[in-house]
Image (spheres, rainbow, N blue to C red):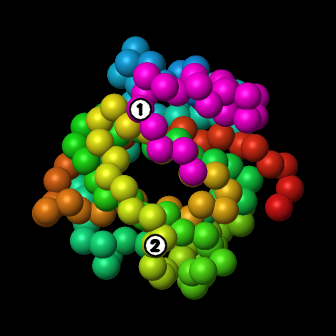
Amino acid sequence: MIYAKHKDALAYQGIHPNLDLALAHITPEFLASVGLERVELKGGEVYATRFTYETIPAEESFFEAHKKFLDIHIMTEGSEGVEIAPPETLTEFDRVEANDFYAYRGKGDHKLTLSPGDFLVVFPGDAHRIKMQLGGPKIVSKVVFKVKIYDKE
């Protein structure tokens, strides 16, 4: 997991070429240009999408994890609570392997607040629970990059 500020994004280059490509696009201009339609940066391996939704109570949220992709969550409006935990400490209740999606329930190890100016990188092995309310429901908007870093499980 990486939890940092937009201005520091390029400091994390060198981990994987696909991650480098995504980090280079954490700019005000690019983030403002991302809409609800997926923006492809590298043919299915690196892309970004904007999500706008109302935050929910923690008990209605769940953890998700991936085995081939990492996610970069970039809050552009509003704030939400996030929890991180190793998947092996959680109980899996759903999976869609074709979409690299694994859903879990359980307790988080780390809690943080994602606000404008922040970005969060969750790697395979970082189950993440998002959309959590902070003092009540709020509308938030964020850009999420999906970045392929493994070909096989």
Contact, mark 2 vs mark 1 (Cβ under 8 Å): no
> Helix, strand or loop at disc 2?
loop
Task: Say few, some or many: other residues with alpha carbon within 10 Å of mark 2 (under 14 / 14 to 19 / 20 or more).
Answer: some
Disc 1 target residue: 5
**Residue drawn at 38 percent across, 18 percent down:** 28
Q: Nearer the viewer, residue 112 or 64?
A: 112
Residue type pointed to by label 1: Lys
Q: For mark 1, does the 10 Å Cα neighbourhood hold few (<14), some (14 to 19), or many (20 or more) residues?
A: some
Q: Which residue does the image show at 23% across and 62% down from the upper left? A: 133
| x and y percentages locating residue 56 in the rendered image | 25, 66
Residue 117: quarter of image: top left
* 13 sits left or right of 134 in the view: right
Write down the residue under mark 2.
108
Mark 2 vs mark 1: which is more N-terminal? 1
Residue at the location (67% across, 33% down)?
19
In the image, 6: left or right of 124?
left
Q: Secondary structure at mark 1?
A: strand
Find residue 66 and report its image quarter: bottom right
Q: Position of residue 98 (x, y in %)?
A: 71, 61
Q: Is residue 20 magenta?
A: yes
Q: Which residues are magenta?
A: 1-22
Left or right of 140 in this view: 107: right
Where is residue 114 shown, x and y percent of the image? 34, 47
**The C terminus - image quarter:** bottom right
Does residue 77 appear in the picture of this structure?
yes
Relative to 150, say whether 28 is above or below: above
- Tally of numbered discs: 2
Task: Compare residues 124 and 95 and report the one nearer the observer.
Answer: 124
Give the farthest residue toward the top: 29
- Name the kind of residue labelled 2 in the image: Gly
Using the image, determine if residue 91 lies above or below residue 141: below
